[in-house]
Amino acid sequence: MPFACKIALFLLFAGSLLPRVVAARPNILLIYTDDQGSVDARCYGARDLTTPAMDSLAAKGVRFTQMLAPAAVCSPSRAGLLGGCIPMRLGAPGNISSSRGGKGLSPRLYLLPEAMRDAGYRTHHVGKWHLGYTDETMPNSQGFETSFGHMGGCIDNYSHFFYWAGPNRHDLWRNGREVWRDGEGFGELMVEEAKAVIASKDKRPFFIYWAINWPHYPLQGSDKWRAHYRARNLAHPRDKYAAFVSTMDELIGQVIAHLDQTGQRNNTIVILQSDHGHSVEERTFRGGGSSGPYRGHKFSFLEGGIRVPAIVSWPGTLPEGEVRDQFVTGCDWFPTLTKWAKAPLPKDMKLDGKDINAVIRSSEAPSPHKDFFWTQDFSRNKNAPWAVRQGDWKLLHRPLDQVTPWKGGKAPGYLLVNLAKDPGESDNLADSEPARLAELKDLAKRYQEDLLPDFQAARK
């Protein structure tokens, strides 16, 4: 009998137990920001930014300093988050088409919203998707009861049109049907949607995946925050990026306040994390975000591309006002949240993510990862960039940095660094540590050999 049917029978014959079962399971609000730089919140040291909502979450939760995104670009990072695996294993090593008809994650995959749904949660997608634009790969077919947002990579936040390349295409959807909210700010529409979900009379616990599409370009901050940074003479393009970050922070604060007002804050896990590092693309004025002491940016497997702001807060249950320096990844939320939600997983399910409950609860707990791997699609490009990490050692193949010049003027074929001694990845030890270089090359090869069959199966 399917697990979902077993749950239905249990609820039918054990109605008197339902309130106790529901109360034992926390609500989950998973906020995934977009193109937010490694240190771009005041609680991460950005003294030029005003981010009271994010800072409050950090004060009431655990803030990570070595949270590494599953990928350095949008679609694969989201795949890794919702699938609990290295994105290549899920068939999504790169961005997925933003056009209607673009195939996305295979419907055969068992994603986080499906696990939550089968465990008795009501599941809601709000914001950006970018994981498929066909009926079978849009959110309502991938475990979400409700969905409101855009399916492609980016939109204008007032016309809700995808503008990357012609012809311009409208991209705003509710539960698989196109809807029109011309001239209404997408930020406010997302807040309205999240509040409605939180205020629902449905007694089941909720899982909200709020994939807020900010501070991804276009940088459309509110007049209030543009004036705020203009008064502080913040330089271009940081001023435009900062205004958008603070506008986003204000919206996040409104939703957190709604949790408080409805009496659900202490029974709600709130996670806030960026999908990868900041953009240096033309559409964001070649910058604005910051990776702080780290090298790299969006599209790069250097730390600035994958080391991201991340906070988890569950008042009264998890530590508050604490920092964790252990090496963890965005894939780890899948096993961690399913454990907290008491959501059973298929016994044969293959996950690269690890349960980080122990790390969250103690600064002394070891990282659950001995090693990890990031990659572009090496099935079609044998020379594709990748990075592998083992402890404090990291090896990058064809590293990308469009901001900081390389020593000698040319990017190395291989960059070997010790992150404990060199978090800025400035000293290449490939020549002085040949044994370590060979060891990590071999580890990367083993990862590739392990990933390829799953990648090919997911693409069928």
Image (cartoon, grey):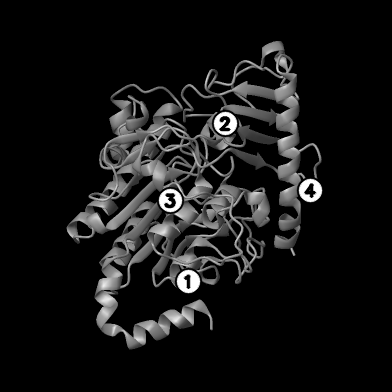
Verify CB contact (< 8 Å) between mark 4 and mark 3: no
Q: Is residue 247 visible?
A: no
Q: Mark 1: which amino acid?
A: Asn
- Which mark, by number, is residue 379? 4
Spatial distance from mark 2 to mark 4, Cα to Cα?
A: 27 Å
Q: Mark 4: which amino acid?
A: Ser
Q: Is residue 415 above or below residue 301?
A: above
Disc 1 on helix, strand or loop?
loop
Write down the residue under mark 3: 212
Indicate which label's residue lies in the foreground, 4 or 3. Answer: 4
Image quadrant assignment for residue 51? top left
Write down the residue under mark 2: 391
Verify CB contact (< 8 Å) between mark 1 and mark 4: no
Disc 1 or 4, which lies upstream in sequence?
1
Image quadrant assignment for residue 243? top left
Residue at point 75% right, 65% down?
460
Residue in front for this viewpoint, 177 or 69? 69
Q: Judge the density around disc 4: few (<14), some (14-19), many (≥20) Cα neighbours within 10 Å.
A: some
Indicate which label's residue lies in the foreground, 1 or 4. Answer: 4
Q: Position of residue 251 (x, y in %)?
A: 31, 48
Verify CB contact (< 8 Å) between mark 2 and mark 4: no
Spatial distance from mark 2 to mark 3, Cα to Cα?
A: 32 Å
Give the side of residue 423 with respect to residue 60, left or right.
right
Spatial distance from mark 4 to mark 3, Cα to Cα?
A: 31 Å
Spatial distance from mark 3 to mark 1, Cα to Cα?
A: 17 Å
Disc 3 on helix, strand or loop?
loop
Q: Judge the density around disc 2: few (<14), some (14-19), many (≥20) Cα neighbours within 10 Å.
A: some
Write down the residue under mark 1: 175
Q: Mark 3: which amino acid?
A: Ile
Image quadrant assignment for residue 397? top right
Disc 2 or 1, which lies upstream in sequence?
1
